[in-house]
Amino acid sequence: MSLGPYASFIVTSYAAAALVVVILIGWIVLDYRNQTQRLRELDRSGVTRRSGLSAMDAP
Amino acid sequence: MTLIDLANPTRFLALTTRVLPWLAGATVILLAIGLYQSAYAPDDYQQGATVKIMFIHVPNAWLSMFVWGVMSIASLGTLVWRHPLADVAAKAAAPIGASFTFLALLTGSLWGRPMWGTYWEWDARLTSVLILFLMYLGLMALWRAVDDPSRAARAAAVLTLVGAINLPIIKFSVDWWNTLHQPASVMRMGGSTLDKSFLIPLLVMAIGFTLLFVTLHLAAMRNEILRRRVRSLQMMQASRVAFSNEVGTGSHQENASTGAA
Amino acid sequence: MSGLDQAKMQLSGRGVACVRGGREVFSGLDFHAASGEALSVVGRNGAGKTSLLRLIAGLLVPAGGTIVLDGGDAEMTLPEQCHYLGHRDALKPALSVEENLAFWADFLGGERSDAAASLEAVGLDHATHLPAAFLSAGQRRRLSLARLLTIRRRIWLLDEPTTALDVAGQDMFGGLMREHLARGGMIIAATHAPLGIDSRELRIGGAA
Amino acid sequence: MTALSALIRRDIRIALRVGGGALIGVLFFLTVVVLMPFAVGPDLALLSRLGPAILWLGALLASLLTLDRLFMADHEDGSLDLITMSRTPLELACAAKALAHWLAAGLPLIVATPVLGLLLNLDMVATSAVALTLLAGTPALTFTGMIGAGLAVTLHRGGLLMAVLVLPLSIPVLIFGVAASQAAIVGPMTFGAPFSILCALSLVSLVVGPFAAAASLRHGLD
């Protein structure tokens, strides 16, 4: 496969797309870790949710 | 699994945990096939190898509009049914949609460079995507500006729906403005004349990217639900502090009040 | 804190007058307070209780008369030795309880004590990492009290300090004020409600 | 020194947290610049000629419109009283607040300039000239605008009134900022002369701004 005279543009597009997607995934994974860790900390400090009700059921 | 079941965030979380690995797997496979096919797609007789940028530009451009559509439906859910999951869905979609829109702009400008000689041309299609991108950023700023998520949700929902109505008007005006200044759009994007050897990889990539969005969106929604849980627990913790004082203040208050009790 | 129990302090005002918005709020006001003593400023609404505190804090300029501190730190001006606790809590909702307190400790400087201990004393030790936005009015007031405890200053100027505090909070605050006076501090408080400690009364603006 | 760095760190932190306005300024800048071609038409040659002026106007509006809450927020929650009473001279505290504002809201504008330069068909040289003049000139905008922010507290009014008061004061900065960028792009003047005047304006405002703001804050307290 030859990319012709504009190879750098093609490669840059694909690389940029990959980079942005990787950043998105990284952000989501880190955010997940953060939130679960904070939940665990809150759990340890003795604050628990009223059972059955969700945190979002409150207005 | 009915819609009522999904309404419960706890059940939604359980479902997400079960579905996510499958979705991620399907996304990876589809994108791999799509990349392979686009790598071996023939060159266009006019554009040469640069046509390969299309396989990544078009799915992102499609997603930039699709995500706004998803947010609009979620916003209806927020305003009409006051569904808490709808808030979460709308909020989680915004940064992902903005990222795809950014990619559409970037690849569009990289695609245009060999043809226009500049990275940016005020071409009608790209300009509309740029305005869409600004609206995504504004929406994200709105989410960030308000501390209380349910209040922010209603404001964001109104803005999203107004945007959904306005976007076609903006698109039309930009088209009109553009033709006023230059007779024909420089970029000719395939349309129905697209050859089958391009169409199949493009479709695979589009489906792959859509699956990628669904995967990321579900994961981001899960994060958002957890974030709200953390928030409400923290608020409970704050009010609990006040309660524990009633017991606690006595200890460093020997001299204070025997009478107050 | 050895630095606090040094010299006896005397704060006195002679013929102090205050004009705000072209209207004379009070004039010819004499007052006097010494370390270890609490002065509670009383009077009807609009009599100028808050204005008097702000005059002492240097936030308003007196239209006449003088306010002099004897026996304080000679290197510092009067406002720099005062804590001013106004109607507003000087808290940023976006920052956590800890960050709010740490900022004022860093910014105001001077002699300070352990922030964690002060938060415990006002009953906020479980909330250190929470954003101040989550706090109720009473809890915000408690957090401002923690500021008075963390940064050691001899003169406390308190404007309606007990509003928003519950009964337990008022008891707690009473204890803190007594401790402060016992260490040689001075309190000047504008208040409608009884302070909960022994204090001399300064009535301004005629009968209530 | 700890007092000032604490103030700077706090202000930047608040600007970046939820509810803070640091990035809204950049978004405003972006939007204003994108609007221009719709008014003047998509002619790239024309846009590249107007580019520096458009960028400078956008940056001017973006940095002034975000300024009106600089002291207002601290005034409303009582922080300003404590800042006034503290050992730190009010002038220095004002300068620290303005510096924090510039770091949180001014620097992002300069970072965004290359992207916008691309949209306006500016080449490398032109873009870097504009970015450089903005780097030298935006501190002047912030420190001049700070005077207006101080007056806003005194007058209990922000927003448009402040803009009306401050915009005339920023005319010299605009003149020499655009002149320096134009000089770098097309000549015939040398880049050095207007650029050094721009730097001088910044330095003067660095001195005058904090004193004027502190003076108006002192008289505005009640």
Image (cartoon, helix red, strand yellow):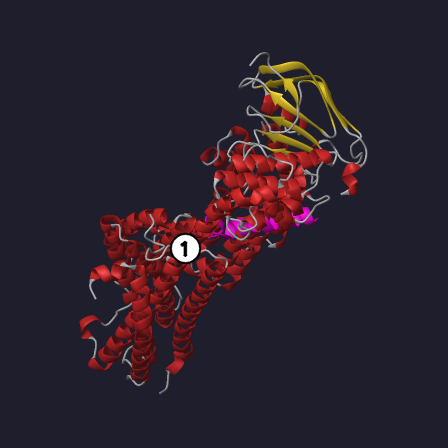
Quarter of the rendering occupied by the C terminus of chain B: top right
> Where is residue D6 shown, x and y percent of the image?
63, 49
Q: Position of residue A12 (x, y in %)?
A: 42, 75
Label 1 chain ID: D
Q: Nearer the viewer, residue D22 or D25?
A: D22
Is D135 placed left or right of B87 in the picture?
Answer: right
Residue B40 lies in the magenta-colored region: no
Counting labels gives: 1
Q: Which element type, helix, strand or loop, lies under badge 1?
A: helix
Left or right: B117, with D143 as reference point? left
Snapshot quadrant of residue B66: bottom left
Residue B239 can be seen in this image: yes
Q: Is residue C154 left or right of residue D108?
A: right
C194 above or below C121? Answer: above
The quadrant holding residue C191 is: top right
Q: Which residue is mark 1?
A: D47
Q: Amino acid at mark 1?
A: Leu
Residue D14: within the magenta?
Answer: yes
Q: Position of residue D208 (x, y in %)?
A: 65, 38
Which residue reaches farthest left? B192
Examine the residues drawn in magenta and state their main secondary structure: helix
Choose between B139 and C43: the one closer to the eye.
Answer: C43
Of residues C56 and D111, the one nearer the viewer is C56
For image coordinates 28% across by 56% down, the residue present is: B86
Q: Quadrant of the N terminus of chain B?
A: bottom left
In the image, residue B148 above or below residue C163: below
Tell me where the magenta segment starts and ends, as one range.
Answer: D1-23
